[in-house]
Image (tube, coloured by chain):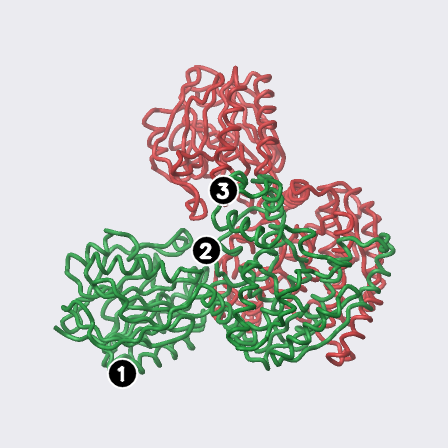
Chain colours: A red, B green
Amino acid sequence: MSTIRIAQAQINPILGDFEYNKKKILKYIEIAREKDADIVIFPELSLCGCPPEDLLLKPGFLETSRKFLDEISKKVSGIVAIIGYPDTDGKNVYDALAVIQEGNIKGKYYKIELQDFEERRYFKEGKEPFSLKLKEALIVPSIGKDIWIEGNVLEDFARKIRADIVLNLSSSPFHIKKFQVRIKVAQRFAKRSEVFLVYTNLVGGQDELVFDGGSFIVSPDGNIIACAKRFSEQLLVTDIKVKEEKSLEETYIAESLSPLEEVYNALVIGTRDYVNKNGFEKVLIGLSGGIDSSVVAAIAVDALGRENVIGVTMPSRFTSSETLNDAERLAKNLGIRLIKLPIEPIYETYLKILEKVFDTSEHTVAHENLQARIRGNLLMAISNRFGYLVLTTGNKSETAVGYCTLYGDTAGGFAPIKDVPKTMVYELARYINSIWAKEIIPESVIKRDPTAELRPNQKDEDTLPPYPVLDRIIHEYVEENKEVEEIIEEGFEPDVVKDVIRMIKRSEYKRRQSPPGIKITAKSFGKDWRFPITNRYMK
Amino acid sequence: MSTIRIAQAQINPILGDFEYNKKKILKYIEIAREKDADIVIFPELSLCGCPPEDLLLKPGFLETSRKFLDEISKKVSGIVAIIGYPDTDGKNVYDALAVIQEGNIKGKYYKIELQDFEERRYFKEGKEPFSLKLKEALIVPSIGKDIWIEGNVLEDFARKIRADIVLNLSSSPFHIKKFQVRIKVAQRFAKRSEVFLVYTNLVGGQDELVFDGGSFIVSPDGNIIACAKRFSEQLLVTDIKVKEEKSLEETYIAESLSPLEEVYNALVIGTRDYVNKNGFEKVLIGLSGGIDSSVVAAIAVDALGRENVIGVTMPSRFTSSETLNDAERLAKNLGIRLIKLPIEPIYETYLKILEKVFDTSEHTVAHENLQARIRGNLLMAISNRFGYLVLTTGNKSETAVGYCTLYGDTAGGFAPIKDVPKTMVYELARYINSIWAKEIIPESVIKRDPTAELRPNQKDEDTLPPYPVLDRIIHEYVEENKEVEEIIEEGFEPDVVKDVIRMIKRSEYKRRQSPPGIKITAKSFGKDWRFPITNRYMK
């Protein structure tokens, strides 16, 4: 019987910033050593950041990665460090990990089960499992999907050599309830193979993805004996007594999160990392007094601090005093600066110029979009002048059906709630008020019927089905990949279903020009969604 | 010895419009039969249009495809028809072709060599080659890359059974000189396997891709004995005498095109198909009097007719009388309507409003972008009012280094010259004047130093290296995938190279929100280019 002290370094690297990542890795190795850990484990591809995409096609990127791995190796002593990085044998590229001990790379392992065709574009699969002995424990390292496929080479190997511990280095992006899926997979593996399964995940935002951390250890009987926080960096240290059924030492187990809490945290870290990793400090948000911009502003304040969030309210002739008051109240509640710029004079000047081309006295969609675009321009002008990033406020329901103005309310660098359905935006609003334990988002904002206020007495429901219906149809169509007839069979109004799906198809061109936003569902309108613009298949 | 009359139906389908495609296929079958062809061949996936992307994940799409194939089959008599379509066995999806004879599907073949991971995302590879006997000829059908790999299953099979003819159904997108590559591959295959190689390609635009047609037949000795036009539909009919070394009948061989002619034709058909297949008739182009908008306008007139192209010139205080005159002259030369909308009053109103936020008396980048965005808004307002599609005028050089204003000059539905380097835009201008045999693009436009005219005396070269240098660096970095040091070694100024590559990296976010445009190089900033926005690797 021997006790192994395992340190899981759940870190948040910056893609391509090898210097920054090296410092972070060395710092975590140092802390792990100070805590007398025997081994410290870093997530999949954490040396370079994840996913590197076409950077993996640059030989210099791979050389740089290798060079930094060597520099780190030289500084490792008194502990075994396991680091995920991209490796190459000059011909192929591998999703690799290195086992580092006393200044040397003692072994390497290449991921065997590549996740999908996105990974196969870059990586060749490894063939050979690998093991290392640490004290009395036999340890088999693995990467990502290696533990997801029952009876594969890796699992057979671990069983055959009677491994005590299987390490899994992961960079698994968040979507709602994904965490529970990972746990289940790991539990099954641990029980089947009678091993401790040590799952180490990346944390942090990278463009549209959020890695949610939540690293954990499952014992051979399937119990979670340790679990790191979600959505933040942590060094999770756990003692494992191998050759025994359970760990006996005390371990850290983070509180579990509800789906809404998960989403909120993903939005906060995703926003913070996009803003900061791209070198911005402050963000600018157009505040309409509606629910979407209110929720985005609250998220931004949590992510960046209130001094780094600037609201801009841009009333027009169609803005009611209620919504204007609400925007002001929200800014006050959040303690952020609010700039007020009326768009009326600009709007009138545009109409006067456009009078040369068409009769502007009749209110049309051109008038509506124009107002949104004037607001977009004002935000971008301030952004250009001061270097603030504009956050857009479109939600998934709008993004799906194209209920938004291209170059208007979609103008900006990042769209935090792009993958959040409108009905969930309301839930988030209530959740936000509950965590601040006071009214942040005014009750009147939550209660008011949604309106774009681009023409007199406009309501979203003039154009769209009620959001609870709309969101369910979108979910069925987008996430469940169902077709018109199947959705109708579930009891929705046939014309409503057809209308919604027609709107989804017709707004492909808008999505193509929209800013990136955070994925929180199993299928977001980002890389998960690959439909042609030119397309007449309407089911 | 027997003569086989082969008809190659180089068609331009519309993605997802099965009714339209069915009619077109039946029409071509009918014409082929009238011309006494023994066999008529349609391109890869031509029944549904190409590439269908995630539509292939919809079971209904595959069912519909199959249903239309059956409908077509029933109408085939007196000829063998070979049609490319997506097939499914309920579990997997295949890139398939059907051999149809006398109302029945007599055989099927599934593509064996999938092109890349994009194709593997959807298709499973076929395993079994297939042959059919027609008169005395033994014919082996194949799809796409099946003939690209020496000594593979398909080639072995064709040789073993001593096939006379190998058919290749293709949907191969255009880039410069790709046609020559296809010919070479086909010649090698034909010579190695001693067969007539009948290569049938799709034609037409689909979002960023242009399929360039140019279907052909290579004889067993490697000669091109027939060749269809590039960039237009055609039924290419050829008599082949099998069991002889050469065809003896007269055949059609289209004129060959220079790289510049290829590009011009791709831009015209790509623009026409994007506009028309998406249900638009007229387009709107902001005419600055510069070379880019002039070339785009000329392409649009060729693609859509002058009555469907509307120019808008939007002078500001920085617009010189020369450029304004040139815009007017261009419109007159092309015979298109020109709308003149001064942006000055709007610009001044914006500055007055923005005065509340910053001192607008000092000219900054915010002022420059604002002008571009006002122009974008005016174009979009007219677009929204009349349903015209806005064509943007950005070229590849600008797109690469981000020398453009997001939501300003990038605002629009389609970017015809997005993949055309600035130096080639000049070549196109001269080429356009040569084909019209008169001055279309004024000489002064071609001669003037490039300027965005967003501040006094602005020249592109204030910000960018001279275009011949810039374009070579972009080519090395983007298309040749070279890194900073390698490019410097080729003799470029180190600081210039570093600057350009830094600009390319930094403008990833702009490209992500830019409209689609036509791919003409081996690596365009579309699906060929997958770099993260958040990325600090600067080589």
Q: Which mark is residue B522?
A: 2
Report crowding for label 2: few under 14, some 14 to 19, many 20 or more residues within 10 A (C-alpha).
Answer: some
At label 3, the amino acid type is Val
Q: Nearer the viewer, mark 2 or mark 1?
A: 2
Q: Secondary structure at mark 2?
A: loop
The residue tagged with tag 1: helix, strand or loop?
Answer: loop
Gap between marks 3 and 1, in whole Å?
A: 61 Å
Dividing the image into 4 quarters, which one contains the N terminus of chain A? Answer: top left
User: Residue A63, percent across and down?
Assistant: 48, 33
Residue at label 1?
A: B35
Mark 3 crowdedness (10 Å alpha carbons): few <14, some 14-19, many ≥20: few
**Pointer 3 residue:** A181
Residue B412's x, y, as percent? 63, 66
Name the chain letter of the residue that bears numbered label 1. Answer: B
Rounded to the nearest angstrom, the CA distance separating label 3 from label 2 is 41 Å
Q: Between residue A201 and residue B468, name the one nearer to us.
A: B468
